[in-house]
Image (cartoon, rainbow, N blue to C red):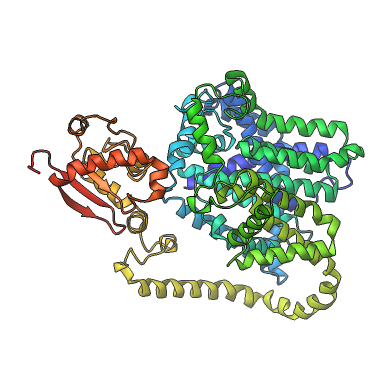
Amino acid sequence: MIVGWCTVLSIILWGLVIDRGIAAWLNRRCNQPFRDGTDFLLSGILPALTIAGGGATFLGAFHGLRWEVVLPIVAVSMVWRRRDLVAVLCDLASLIRKIAAEVKNGNPLPALAALTCLILCYVWSVLSLFPPSVADVWVFHIPLANSIIDHAGFVSPQIDHPFYGNIPLFFNLLFALVMMVSGHWTGAAIMNIAIFFGFLFLLSSCASRWRACGFFLVAALILITPFFRGSVGEPMTDLARSCFSVAAVLFLWRYLESRRPAELFHCALALGGAVGGKYTELQMVGLMGLALIPMLLKGRISLPLLLSCLGAFLAIAGYWYAKNLIVLGNPIYPFMFGHPGLTDAWMADYMLELGRAFDPADRHFVTNLATLQGWHDFLYILYDWFLANKPNAFVALALILAGLAVAFRRIAFLAAIVVAMFVIWYTVMFNHIRWATPAYLLFFSTGFIGASLVRERLDQWLDRRVLPQIAPLAKIASSPACMVASPVIIGLLAGGLWISHWNRMGGSDIDPVKAKDFDVVLGMISVDKYMESHREAYFMYRYIADHDLRTVFQPFDTANTLLSAAYNGGRDGGWQLPRYVLPAPGTDIDAFIKANQIAYFIIPPDAGSAFLAERIGEDKIAMANSVIARMMPRSSLILTDRFGWKLYRFDADRPS
């Protein structure tokens, strides 16, 4: 975990150094090239990661993504841009001094914001030790990152699948940069944590003043929502590409506010990262283009700046689409222009899956907004999925409306993009709520911008009425006695709460079933004990590996062999038969059992569910049940876990 964070911070530092030189050159004609050093640090993390990813893309295209190539390039570039390196380090030192000065002057908020960031990073870093239960992590994302490392770059296909081996891989490349050093999948999770915090810092830096207060408002709006909070420490790409998509919108808004060319350049970088990570983010190219057309027609964007931004976008996103065009004849393979390597039947099934709701219970909703029923269902979904029982969402909506009331022209652009993204999601990608992550994230971001605009209107009133009232409190808080007593009191209070919670949970005999994930963060229970009591299949798959049971028939888990390895430290002992290995219709089932040496089988509690039948296939479920029915008379139950999973031993020699 520590190695992963050191690697990520080193990548960010290198990107910041390169970005500072570019931004200074682009803003050379501005009276104030940088708003201030703090703003550059807060808003520059995502562009820095994008620049690092762009450099890695270039190396990977020539199979030069190995440390004997990367380290000399980084060292030479740091020496070459040593003035920018010194400037970045001075900005960081200045930020630390500002925080200390604010505390001395009686304003603890910057220090509290910094402490909150450190605590949250620690919490998510610990939670990232939980092996993800999402099959996509083990089927695609981690294998793709490992493949990039193994090949020192890119091949076609990157993994043994024509579709998933040829999709845009910008975020998997960022995962690979960390995993090259850490050697563990948690490196990918730490990269996702850094991306998320980079977005939070960018959003909080959009406030003209009181950025520490802004960070707490950002945290209150976004982190309260489990929809975002639960995805931070997982090595998936959905939240990462959403952060980059929304960051592109925010950078464009910052350009409209400040007219600094570097903001538009950062918009192009972030958009390139988003498009280089997922086909779905091509929608943002259209939306950004529509927003820029009026300025282009009025000549408010110079041709050199436009070409610079276009070059930055293509440098980040262009490789993946150019490679597919050259190798497969389709830049957005396998959509629209052909799908070599994939059968028409597979493509038809895939398009059917993408074009309808993931949950069969949601398929009655009408997505055609040309009908009245379509609008009725759309508004119902917006309320039921995104607003109902979510007070922070209603607060964000109120802040957007307040922002429109006090500064309509400054926030109307963001509000229009939010509406457009929700409409596109509902009409084109209404498969799962996760495809709406960029729209939902921009919704909360626009709420924060609305709060910032309202606060700007209240600045004079706050300076005249509120600040004088709290001046005595600030004087007390800045006194030496208070500055010494405060951390002592906080430390004693935290220790007392920890001991109280320890005793309440049972001390050293803590019940794993009653434990929460935060108890792992507090060190009260190990990751393994927590996972055994809270994650389906974890205890079962660990038991199988610990006792070297083989061969286990488990046709009801779409990622059984992958999770079995992930839950056992990456070891794959061949304990389980891959779930797709089933007898063909008309095959002798006894011969199938004997040929595969099946000695155990698992039945989960949802083996007969309609949802599982749809995901795996009714014909395959029927065939799996026929195999189990054949073994059951000669089987005995040896284990049942707390989730209802049952492990049976099959005795082929026992009479039925």
Side (left or right) of 164 relative to 523 = right
- Name of the residue lying farthest toward the right: 298
Residue located 78% across and 80% down the image: 469
Instruction: Name above or below for residue 586 compared with residue 189.
Output: above
How many labels sit on residues? 0
Side (left or right) of 270 relative to 585 = right
Side (left or right) of 523 relative to 572 = right
Q: Position of residue 186 (x, y in %)?
A: 46, 45
Q: Is residue 526 visible?
A: yes
Q: Is residue 210 visible?
A: no
Side (left or right) of 38 relative to 655 = right
Instruction: Name above or below for residue 151 compared with residue 448.
Output: above
Q: Position of residue 33 (x, y in %)?
A: 83, 45
Q: Position of residue 135 (x, y in %)?
A: 43, 43
Closer-to-camera residue (423/150): 423
Residue located 81% across and 73% down the image: 462
Residue located 48% across and 50% down the image: 360
Residue located 31% across and 36% down the image: 572
Give residue 322's quadrant in the image: top right
In the rendered image, the quadrant that contains the C terminus is top left
Instruction: Name above or below for residue 269 compared with residue 64.
Output: below
Q: Position of residue 407 (x, y in %)?
A: 84, 61
